[in-house]
Image: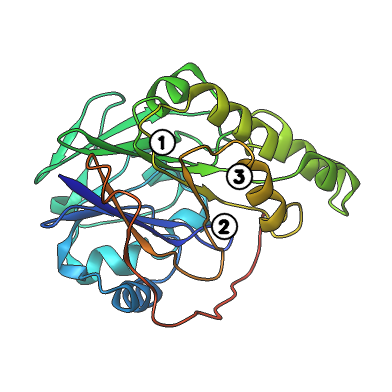
Amino acid sequence: MSLFITSLNSGSNGNCYYIGNDSEAVLVDAGISCREIERRMKRLGLLMEKIKAVFVSHEHSDHIKGLPVLVKKYQLPVYITPMTMLSGRLNFEENLLKNFIAHQPVSIGGLSVTAFPKFHDACDPYSFIVSDDNVCIGVFTDIGEPCVHLKKYFQKCHAAFLEANYDEKMLEEGSYPIYLKNRIRGGKGHLSNKQAAELFMTYKPDFMSHLLLSHLSKNNNSPELVQELFNAHAENVKIIIASRYEETEVFRISLNESIKQIPFYQPVAKSTLQLSLPFT
């Protein structure tokens, strides 16, 4: 069995992650417009009809701003907690509203989605793992510091989207006001490159094949710096930087060693979209 994954966008200008099998898929967050989700999936050869639900991590605009149009247009079930709904000032048709409970799997066709709480400056934030039989994918972004739950679930993953938001030196020496620097690094903000690398090196399972480094800051990080850091410790794991401007390839994640490193599809065009950057 295989799962197909891609980052449709990753950063403070919008986050949206696709995980699916041959029959159905889910999105984790919809922080870019419905139109842009459609465009990027079309370039990747992915069908909107396969999306069966959207799971919402928290209420910050870079995770929900495309959600109302997407849910209404495709009549998608949206899995979201009541507190996130209220804080995000969201409103959906009652028949599309679904809740989830921490650590309790939700079945979406052949997919199983499990949420768990995380440290972030939102009212009720969650991370997710998505699995199909024995293949497991993690979506771990917007995390102030690694908690016991993150460490446990990371060890189950054949692939993961893992935040590497900022370089500590770049943040300290950068132009951000001190209150914003402290917000980012204060335990309920974002993971630094160092924190993410320590998690990866300490808890990476032997069977992990892909790591998509996500939610990189435009102002306080460098894709080249992150790539170099993680490549030094990658061993057999393919390291990918998830862009804030365009979709990644679609990667096929499988238990079969002979195919798990092969990209499913290459993007046929590059996106030049650049949105506002409220919190990088």
Q: Secondary structure at mark 1?
A: strand
Whether residue 195 sits left or right of residue 253 in the image: it is right
Q: CA distance from mark 1 to mark 2?
A: 16 Å
Sequence-wise, the earlier of marks 2 and 3 is 2
Residue 12 in the image: state x and y as whole percent.
59, 57
Q: Which is nearer the eye, 162 or 258?
A: 258
Q: Amino acid at mark 2?
A: Gly
Image position, residue 169 (x, y; %): 84, 42
Of all residues shown, which one is farthest toward the front?
258
Q: Quadrant of the C terminus?
A: bottom right
Which is more toward the observer, 26 or 3? 3
Residue 153 image position (x, y, % from top left): 38, 25
Question: Which residue is rendered at x = 15% and y = 68% of the image?
Answer: 49
Where disc 2 sits, the SS reads loop
Q: In this figure, which residue is indicated by the disc labeled 2?
A: 11
Numbered circle sitting on residue 127: 1
Which comes before the other along the chain, label 3 or label 1?
1
User: If you read the primary sequence from the N terminus, does the residue marked by circle 1 or circle 2 appear first?
Assistant: 2
Q: How many marks?
A: 3
Distance from the alpha carbon under mark 2 to that under mark 3: 21 Å
Instruction: Give the quarter of the image for residue 131.
Output: top left
For label 1, count other residues whose C-alpha is less than 10 Å away and answer few (under 14), some (14-19) or many (20+): many
* The quarter of the displayed image where residue 120 is located: top right
Q: Which residue is mark 3?
A: 231
**Going 54% across and 31% down the picture, which residue do you hit?**
200
Label 2 crowd (10 A; few <14 / some 14-19 / many >=20)? many
Residue type beneath disc 3: Asn
Mark 3 or 1: in front is: 3
52 displayed left or right of 272: left
Q: Give the residue type that dot 1 points to.
A: Ser
Q: Is residue 44 left or right of residue 97?
A: right
